[in-house]
Image (cartoon, helix red, strand yellow):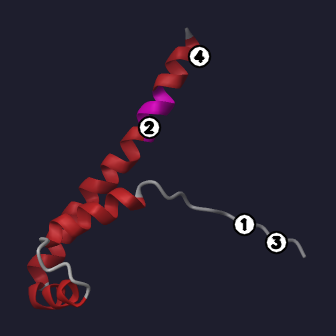
Amino acid sequence: MKALFALAAILGIIMLIPILGTLIGCFVGWTVGIFWPNTFAAFLTHFGLSAFAPWQIGAMLGFVGGFFKAMQTNNKD
């Protein structure tokens, strides 16, 4: 029974990280779009993404970034 709860907790955390990344990215994209609308519009036009709102770009990047983990390397040469 403990193993089932541990598995459910691990799966919940794995699902929660990309969702939190999406929400944070959405908020950050929205904030950037409010304070620097012309700069952000020029950036999106440069990459051909002018059809998207800043919060949509932020949400996409936050979702993708939620799947990356911090890597720690130790070189003992």
Stretch in magenta:
9-14
Q: In the rendered view, tell whether residue 17 sits above or below residue 43.
A: above
**Residue 19: which disc?**
none
Marks 3/2 in contact by CB < 8 Å: the verdict is no
- Tag 3 residue: 75
Residue labelled with disc 4:
3
Q: CA distance from mark 4 to mark 1?
A: 31 Å
- Is mark 1 in CB contact (under 8 Å) with mark 2? no
Q: Does the segment drawn in magenta span residue 65?
A: no
Q: CA distance from mark 3 to mark 2?
A: 30 Å
- Amino acid carrying mark 4 in the image: Ala
What kind of element bears circle 4?
Answer: helix
User: Mark 3: few, some, or many residues within 10 Å (few <14, many ≥20)?
Assistant: few
Task: Give how far across and how far down residue 54 sits, in percent.
Answer: 16, 72
Q: Sequence order check: which comes first, mark 4 or mark 2?
A: 4
Dot 1 amino acid type: Thr
* Residue 15 percent across, percent down from the top left: 39, 39
Of helix, strand and loop, which one carries label 1?
A: loop
In the rendered structure, the answer to whether residue 10 lies left or right of residue 77 reads left
Residue located at (67% from left, 63% from top): 72
**Placement of the C terminus among the 4 image quadrants:** bottom right
Farthest-out residue, right: 77
Query: Residue flagged by tag 2: what amino acid is it?
Result: Ile
| Label 2 CA crowd tier, 10 Å (few <14, some 14–19, many 20+) | few
Quadrant of the snapshot with the N terminus? top right
Location of mark 2 (residue) = 13
Foreground pick, 46 / 73: 46
Query: Could you give the CA–CA distance between mark 1 and mark 3, rounded to whole angstroms?
Result: 6 Å
Say which residue label 1 marks: 73
Residue plotted at (19% across, 63% down): 27
Mark 1–mark 3 CB contact (< 8 Å) = yes
Image point 24% across, 54% down: which residue?
A: 23
